[in-house]
Amino acid sequence: MSKEIEKILLEMGLNARKSSQSLALASTQQKNESLTNMANSIDRGTKKILEANNLDIKKAKENNISKSFLDRLILNDERIKSMSDGLRAIEKLKDPVGQQIARWKRPNGLDIERIRTPLGVIAVIYESRPNVTADAGALCIKAGNAVILRGGSESYHSSSAIYNFLKEGLIQSNLPEHSIQIIPTTDRSAVGYLLSGLDNSIDVVVPRGGKSLVERVQNEAKIPVFGHLEGICHLYVDKDADIEKAINITINAKMRRTGICGAAETLLIDEDKASDFLPKLNKALKESGCEVRGCERSTELLNNIILAKPSDWDTEYLDSIISIKIVKGISGAIDHINKHSTNHTDSIITENNNTAEIFLKGIDSAIVMHNTSTQFADGGEFGMGAEIGIATGKFHARGPVGVEQLTTFKYIVRGSGQVRS
């Protein structure tokens, strides 16, 4: 079976490489037309996608998966419409391919230009969220890349159904049908073959899922990786924070969707604000169904919360749980975050702009915020149409990985007969 999977994947790699060469030359109009056709196909196929999703949900419930995991898996009319709307939003984005980044002339007359070009072939490995199938496929096409998708076994039927409608849109637009491919098996050995690079067919891999998946990809991949291990996102409530604003932001950042990587996991509170703010916040958190764990000083102010363990400061709950720590001012907050951060998203709540600037400069995360919810850490909310994932590394792509991040660049040098002495 593994030899058969290897054969299938190697053929997929070759087809992807051939398709990427055509996509690199495709016009903006042709790529945009394919995205519109994909969106229309998904709209028409809503019933079939929901039927496929019901198969995945039934199996997931039989396996007693967590509530947050199930939330990421479930599709409905609204989520499918959001998926097709996302494709149309990507279609409206400026085409990054061929975009001039810089241009200058040398004293010897050489004209040098740096322009954006596609990365080539991208592999995307993801778990429970079937909507990633559409987001990743569309973003790669817009940026002129071919893509090989490997969805999780728990979302296999849903992702396969969505893929079929993406493929339909490609064919209608006369783009290579292998521009988007999905691995047709749930066998785990397929991931290993994919991470080998498929005989240099793949240029970069993007893992989107839990810590174990990303850790495996980063450890085994023989090709560059865009990804993040965890999203331990922090909120810091400064002494100059507006209490009502801070409560609203905290509840949204933690409880809007607890299972996404932009959900807040740790709340830091300035010691000068704690006695006034913490009882009100705790009441709101409890009413929203959130379990509260706090440092020793927090438990002195509140007798109905759980004493946090040292491990809580390094835990991505992805659940209705938040850990609270009282710190000594902005310096205490920055020290804690930089010690426990996964460099994903961190936010300060304050009406003092000077303090905010200290935080924004002092925190070395991919996304740093002021007076807003960490749940805005999302490519769609950033105006990118969608995202393949959030990258927390420091090379090339960082933060939401959208169309521009799915390109590299090359230099074009024009001369008039110059030779080097």
Image (tube, helix red, strand yellow):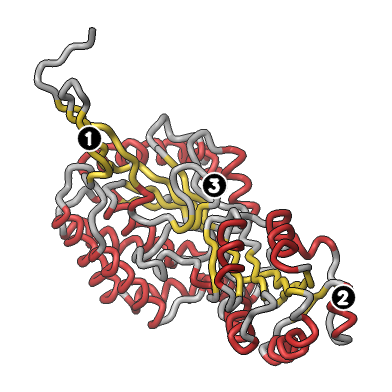
Q: Does 100 appear above or below 299?
A: above
Foreground residue among 164 and 351: 351
Q: Which residue is mark 3?
A: 393
Query: Which comes sooner in the sequence, label 3 or label 2?
Result: 2
**In this view, the mark in front (1 or 3):** 1
Q: CA distance from mark 1 to mark 3?
A: 30 Å
Tell whether 200 sits left or right of 218: left
Query: Which comes sooner in the sequence, label 1 or label 3?
Result: 1
Q: Does 300 appear above or below 314?
A: below
Q: Which residue is mark 2?
A: 297
Q: Which residue is mark 1?
A: 104
How many numbered discs?
Answer: 3
* Point 55% across, 52% down: residue: 392
Q: Which part of the image, by quadrant, shows the C terminus?
A: top left
Q: Secondary structure at mark 1?
A: strand
At label 3, the amino acid type is Gly
Residue 41 in sight: yes
**In this view, the mark in front (1 or 2):** 1
Q: CA distance from mark 3 to mark 2?
A: 34 Å
At label 1, the amino acid type is Trp
* Point 52% across, 45% down: residue: 394
Q: Secondary structure at mark 3?
A: loop
Residue 185 in sight: no
Relative image position of residue 161 (x, y in whole percent): 37, 66
